[in-house]
């Protein structure tokens, strides 16, 4: 049961029979992993940004693509579904697939929710990057929150047929729209095949070039286009790449439904492509990250591997958890003064370096007769890249003990 109102980001939302968002999911709003410095999803966002900023228009001397990554994930049913022509009875609207705040408001299920607003605001080429929410199982490849990058590019007649000049240098009389064109597998009603084919070529070229840029070493990266269906594009495709003999779907895309452009306030003068790609899937392949849940990890063993400024740097993630932990306790008598646990943690990290995974104070008491404090610390050792030997750990552990004796006047128990 929910209270009559939920407060999210200082905004009040009334609840109703549609409300199904959970506290755990709400607690993730605003974390913006794609904007967290050095986070792998932030590195990938920067690379997308860089690639699309390079697609500038030399006549305008400004970037062709605008990049929007700060829109709230709380959207209306209108934005997420109606604006992009998702039918009223479509399964993707159900409560079992989405996190609703109320019957009219939900956490966006895709960045396509912003297509119409962004076109309305005057953009004709943009990326929209953000967190998206879908009810799902939780396992190494599924998590109910992930991140998407939406890409849209619109063309008017001049932009589309720019290279189509005849021998006299006159623009050929090619049209985007023709009255008696009907819808078939290759195009929408009203679109000419030549316009659709040029937009399709632009879309596929943009995507294949992007992946060549993201995976420069993968000369052997096989890829393919698979026919697909989306309510907001036609024709539509999915782009897949082959890794270790398995095919992975990286994105969905297609020629935007003309109705979506009409909803955006455009008349019969533009045609465009759109794609939506999942950042986690790509980052997992790019860095060899085996489990989607790791993106939410605060473990320095994970994050420290991405602590570099140059986002184009190619690194392979080294699993932190497949080597065994080694747990050693250290109990000691101290004098009248206790050791500040923070000083002890620093000391242990200084001596043990990367091999120390966790340190914690597990027990502490005062012995009246002896007039001494006792403290017990638990130190968990784990190497990122090998199994540690008992001997190796004992040496570090002994160093820590020696330091405590010399520095704090401790007596090891
Ligand atoms: N919104 C679609 C999804 O989340 C992806 C998509 C975007 C497909 C744009 C086509 C065009 O699955």
Image (tube, rainbow, N blue to C red):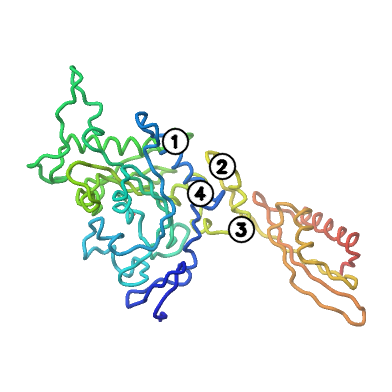
Q: Which residue is mark 3?
A: 299
- Mark number displayed over residue 315: 2
Q: How far is disc 4 from disc 1 in space, using C-alphas?
A: 17 Å
**Residue 392 falls left or right of residue 62:** right
The x and y percentages for residue 273 are 28, 43
Q: Secondary structure at mark 4?
A: helix
Q: Which residue is mark 4?
A: 42
Quadrant for the C terminus, please: bottom right
Whether pointer 3 and pointer 2 mark residues with C-beta atoms closer than 8 Å, the reply is no
Q: Which residue is mark 1?
A: 213
Give the mark nearer the N terminus: 2 vs 4. Answer: 4
Of tags 2 and 4, which is closer to the observer?
4
Give the mark nearer the N terminus: 3 vs 1. Answer: 1
Give the mark nearer the N terminus: 4 vs 1. Answer: 4
The x and y percentages for residue 117 are 31, 53
Q: Secondary structure at mark 2?
A: loop
Q: Secondary structure at mark 3?
A: loop
Q: Residue furthest left?
A: 180
The x and y percentages for residue 100 are 35, 69
């Amino acid at each position: 049961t929910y209270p009559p109102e939920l407060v999210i980001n200082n905004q009040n939302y009334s609840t109703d029979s549609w409300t199904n968002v959970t506290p755990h999911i709400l607690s993730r709003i605003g974390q913006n992993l794609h904007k967290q410095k050095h986070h792998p999803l932030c590195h990938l966002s920067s690379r997308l940004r860089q690639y699309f900023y390079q697609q500038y228009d030399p006549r305008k001397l400004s970037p062709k693509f605008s990049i929007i990554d700060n829109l709230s994930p709380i959207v209306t049913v209108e934005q997420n579904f109606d604006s992009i022509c998702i039918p009223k009875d479509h399964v993707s609207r159900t409560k079992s697939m989405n996190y609703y705040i109320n019957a009219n408001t939900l956490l966006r299920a895709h960045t396509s929710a912003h297509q119409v607003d962004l076109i309305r605001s005057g953009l004709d080429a943009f990326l929209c990057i953000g967190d998206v929410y879908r009810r799902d199982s939780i396992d190494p490849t599924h998590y109910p929150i992930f991140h998407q990058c939406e890409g849209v590019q619109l063309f008017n007649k001049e932009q589309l047929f720019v290279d189509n000049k005849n021998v006299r240098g006159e623009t050929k009389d090619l049209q985007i729209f023709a009255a008696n064109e009907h819808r078939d597998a290759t195009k929408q009603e009203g679109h000419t095949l030549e316009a659709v084919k040029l937009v399709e070529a632009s879309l596929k070229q943009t995507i294949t070039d992007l992946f060549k840029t993201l995976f420069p070493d993968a000369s052997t990266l096989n890829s393919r286009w698979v026919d697909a269906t989306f309510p907001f594009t036609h024709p539509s495709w999915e782009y897949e790449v082959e890794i270790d003999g398995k095919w992975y779907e990286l994105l969905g895309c297609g020629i935007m439904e003309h109705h979506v452009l009409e909803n955006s306030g455009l008349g019969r003068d533009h045609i465009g492509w759109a794609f939506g790609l999942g950042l986690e899937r790509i980052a997992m392949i790019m860095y060899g990250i085996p489990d989607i849940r790791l993106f939410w990890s605060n473990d320095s063993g994970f994050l420290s591997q991405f602590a570099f400024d140059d986002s184009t740097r190619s690194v392979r993630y080294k699993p932190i958890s497949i080597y065994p932990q080694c747990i050693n306790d250290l109990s000691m008598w101290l004098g009248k003064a206790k050791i500040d646990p923070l000083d002890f943690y620093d000391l242990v990290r200084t001596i043990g370096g990367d091999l120390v995974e966790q340190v914690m104070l597990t027990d502490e008491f005062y012995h009246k007769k002896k007039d001494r404090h006792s403290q017990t610390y638990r130190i968990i050792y784990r190497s990122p890249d090998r199994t540690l030997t008992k001997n190796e750990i004992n040496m570090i552990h002994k160093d820590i003990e020696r330091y405590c004796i010399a520095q704090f006047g401790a007596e090891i128990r």
